[in-house]
Amino acid sequence: MEEITQGVNNINLTADSHKKNRIQVSNTKKPLFFYVNLAKRYMQQHNEVELSALGMAIATVVTIAEILKNNGLAVEKKITTSTVDMKEDARGRPVQKAKIEILLGKTENFDELMAASAEERDGVDGEAQG
């Protein structure tokens, strides 16, 4: 019995560690740059971030990934597309929704770019106070 409990605990730990760097993006709940900045923070902490979305939010996920890539902060590691059955119809009928998952990793100069943008931000604040 102890072995089963230990096995279940191990499964939960691996599932939790996988979800720590995952962002489920919505195109209505938060602004675009909230997700961009959150993805940057997750990449600082975990060296990679997984962006995930359903349906209409897929365009937002692609935009976030492109912003991070074009700024030299991220590289694509993996892109997964699929469909998910959801009960969205008023009659309770299952409806298929498109799903995308994009795994982004840090670039080699990620830390340098983040430090430079932090210095730039601090420098602007210092001038405004002075």
Image (cartoon, rainbow, N blue to C red):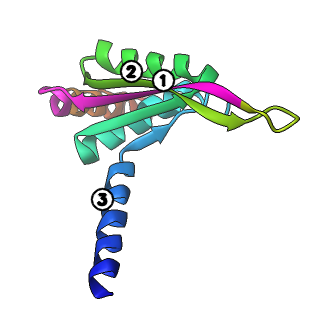
Answer yes or no: do the residues labelled 2 and 1 have beta carbons within 8 Å? yes
Work out whether residue 105 or residue 44 is closer to the camera in this orientation and state it: 105
How many neighbours does mark 1 have within 10 angstroms: few (below 14), some (14-19), or many (20 or more)?
A: many
Q: Would you say the magenta stretch is mainly helix, strand or loop?
A: strand
Horizontal side of 55 relative to 4 (left or right) equals right
Residue 43 marker: none
Q: Position of residue 96 (x, y in %)?
A: 64, 26
User: Mark 3 against mark 1, which lies toward the viewer?
Assistant: 3
Secondary structure category for the residue under label 1: helix
Q: Is 20 above or below relative to 80?
A: below
In the image, farthest residue toward the left: 108
How many neighbours does mark 3 have within 10 angstroms: few (below 14), some (14-19), or many (20 or more)?
A: few
Horizontal side of 95 relative to 60 (left or right) equals right
Q: Which residue is mark 2?
A: 65
Work out whether residue 41 or residue 52 is closer to the camera in this orientation and state it: 52
Q: CA distance from mark 3 to mark 1?
A: 25 Å
Q: CA distance from mark 3 to mark 2?
A: 25 Å
Q: Is 43 above or below relative to 65?
A: below
Q: Amino acid at mark 3?
A: Thr
User: Mark 3 against mark 2, which lies toward the viewer?
Assistant: 3
Residue 14 marker: 3
Q: Which portion, as a residue range, is magenta?
A: 95-112
Q: Position of residue 12 (x, y in %)?
A: 37, 65
Q: Amino acid at mark 2?
A: Ala
Image mark count: 3
Residue beneath the point at 14% across and 26% down:
109
Q: Report whether residue 64 is seen.
A: yes
Residue 61 marker: 1
